[in-house]
Image (cartoon, rainbow, N blue to C red):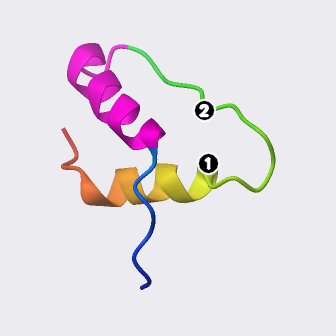
Amino acid sequence: MAKLFRRKIYDRLLEWKRESRGEYAILIEGARRVGKSTVARTFGTSTDPT
């Protein structure tokens, strides 16, 4: 798989995961075709399931 750009949102997702402790969901909004699904998929597969 090609190396992806590290996006600012990735750091925000890590912060959300640390602070929420699974108590609430997150909504990723933005323009079309900017990588929202890709960053969510990458985040989901690269972080531990806790």
- State the count of labels: 2
> What residue do we see at 61% from left, 48% from top?
36
Q: Residue type at mark 2: give it.
A: Ile
Q: What main secondary structure does the magenta stretch of the protein show?
A: helix
Above or below: residue 41 compared with residue 23 = below
Which labelled disc corresponds to residue 25?
Answer: none
Q: Work out which residue is located at the far bottom of the displayed protein and give it.
A: 1
Sequence order check, earlier mark of 1 and 2? 2
Cα distance in 3D space between marks 1 and 2: 7 Å
Q: Position of residue 37 (x, y in %)?
A: 61, 53
Left or right of 48 in this view: 39:
right
Left or right of 16 in this view: 30:
right
Which labelled disc corresponds to residue 28?
Answer: 2
Q: Residue type at mark 1: give it.
A: Lys
Toward which corner of the image does residue 22 lie, by quadrant? top left
Is disc 1 in contact with disc 2, using a CB cutoff of under 8 Å?
Answer: yes
Looking at the rendered image, the quarter that the N terminus falls into is bottom left
Residue 10 is covered by the magenta coloring: yes
Left or right of 21 in this view: 42:
right
> What residue do we see at 60% from left, 32% from top?
28
> What residue do we see at 59% from left, 26% from top?
27
> Which segment did they paint magenta?
8-23
Residue 2 is covered by the magenta coloring: no
Q: Position of residue 46 (x, y in %)?
A: 27, 58
> What residue do we see at 30% from left, 16% from top?
20
Above or below: residue 28 compared with residue 34 = above
Query: How many neighbours does mark 1 have within 10 angstroms: few (below 14), some (14-19), or many (20 or more)?
Result: some
Looking at the rendered image, the quarter that the C terminus falls into is top left
Q: Position of residue 48 (x, y in %)?
A: 18, 49
Instruction: Give the residue at mark 1.
Output: 36
Query: How many neighbours does mark 2 have within 10 angstroms: few (below 14), some (14-19), or many (20 or more)?
Result: few
